[in-house]
Amino acid sequence: QRVLERALTERAAAAIRQVRTEKDLAPCLGTLGNVLGDLGERAAARAAYEEALGIYRRLAEQHPAAYEPAVATTLNNLGNLLIKRNRLVEALPVLDAALALNPDSVAALNNRGLTHHGLGHLALAQADFERALALAPNFPEALKNLGTVLHGQGRLDDSIASYQRAIALKPKFANAYYNMALAYKDQLRLDEALRAAEAGLDCEPRSADLLA
């Protein structure tokens, strides 16, 4: 289905280029970036996002209220892609720029938190995840990510509580079960660690992490 979606999006982008309507081309490029990223073609996805971003920025110079939200969304998508490519140093200023335009973007806060965490900036990561959760308390990914930061700070009880909240909201959250199993293991609560790992495997039977 994604391959078909890619083909249709590329065809639409090609048709739009022929009539040179940039305001129609930009969202098509954004969609193409999303599809290419999901297909693992991350270099091509980055090119699509960057072209869309250039268009949106030109449009925002004339109509900021209309196009700055699209600039912010595209920056967040690009930042997310860079995280997946483990290019965290590049991702950070991109996500800073997204949040400068939209400080209440829960997705960008979560992505910047992931970036800070990957760079070892635990306090900054915690602040971003907590800000995201203040805006969206029922955001399971941010709860799981906050749990990971708390684990790294040695706050194991708080970490487990955060994982439990994430799982309550998303019962099939295998990665949260895996992280919770690690936290229990670090507390030498081995029976609970095993139960958490088994619950995670029930959600995702082929998980390499949970099978390790």
Image: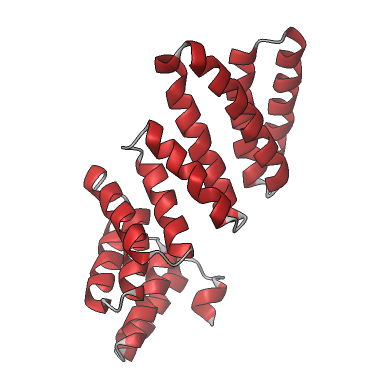
- Report if residue 201 is visible in the image: yes
Residue located 44% across and 50% down the image: 111
Does the image show residue 170?
Answer: no
The picture quadrant where one finds residue 176 is: bottom left
| Residue occupying the point 60% across, 31% down | 31
Res 18 → quadrant: top right
Residue 175: % across, % down: 44, 66
Name the residue rendered at 23%, 71% in the picture.
158
Q: With respect to residue 123, does 158 lie above or below?
A: below
Nearer-the-camera pick, 88 or 21: 88
Snapshot quadrant of residue 202: bottom left
Residue 206 % position (x, y): 57, 70
Q: Is residue 143 above or below residue 80?
A: below
Q: Quadrant of the N terminus?
A: top right
Residue 40 appears at what percent x and percent y? Answer: 68, 50
Task: Give 26 or 68, whichever is nearer the viewer.
Answer: 68
Q: Please state which of residues 19 and 38 is positioned toward the viewer in this rendering.
A: 19
Q: Quadrant of the C terminus?
A: bottom right
Q: Position of residue 29 (x, y in %)?
A: 64, 27
Q: Is residue 81 left or right of residue 101?
A: right
Residue 78 vs residue 161, the one in the foreground: 78
Above or below 188: residue 62: above
Point 43% across, 51% down: residue:
112
Q: Is residue 100 left or right of residue 44?
A: left
